[in-house]
Amino acid sequence: MATEGVGGSGSSSEVENDLEMKLLRDRFRLSAISIAESQANKSGMEVSNVVVACIADLAFKYTERLAKDLQLFSQHANRKSVNIEDVILSAHRNEHLSGLLRTFSNDLKDRQFERKRKKNDKTTA
């Protein structure tokens, strides 16, 4: 909901942000519903539309909270953007997920190192 300015109406940027947020929430909801229905079908289960909608809303709220946490972690480290360490830190309560994220991060670093090494090999040849 847009906040009202001095003139009594919300600014156009606030209205645009609200519209973008609603569109994002709707797209997220549709994706979550699609995933939940697909998984239910694979498992041979039926899930009521109310439950699927609830799952989609909870997932969106969780994602909003995660995004705010990531922003706070990066700000605390005096950075303007979120990095992989912030994502790993956000998963600290889930040991399995933290381990998977660390492995993924290390794999990414290894790939970047290999690309740099191949690039250097080509320039020196």
Image (cartoon, rainbow, N blue to C red):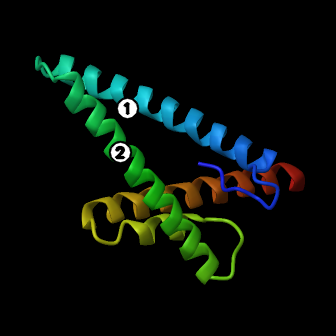
Q: Is residue 4 above or below residue 42?
A: below
Residue 109 in percent (x, y) is at 58, 61
Residue drawn at x 44%, y 51% is 63
Residue drawn at x 34%, y 72% is 92
Q: What's under tag 1, amino acid-wise?
A: Ala
Front residue of 117 and 70: 70
Circle 2 sits on which residue?
A: 59
Circle 1 sits on which residue?
A: 32
Q: Is residue 91 above or below residue 42?
A: below
Locate residue 96: give its quadrant. Answer: bottom left
Circle on res. 8: none
Do the CB atoms of the residues marked 1 and 2 lie less than 8 Å apart?
A: yes
Front residue of 98 and 7: 7
Q: What's under tag 2, amino acid-wise?
A: Ala
Please, what secondary structure does the residue beneath circle 2 have?
helix
Crowdedness near tag 2: few (<14), some (14–19) or many (≥20) residues, C-alpha within 10 Å: some
Locate residue 56: give its quadrant. Answer: top left
Crowdedness near tag 1: few (<14), some (14–19) or many (≥20) residues, C-alpha within 10 Å: many
Residue 46 in percent (x, y) is at 13, 19
Q: As drawn, which residue projects farthest toward the front?
A: 8
Please, what secondary structure does the residue beneath circle 1 have?
helix
Q: Alpha carbon of mark 1 to alpha carbon of mark 2: how far?
A: 8 Å
In the visual, does 14 lie left or right of 46? right
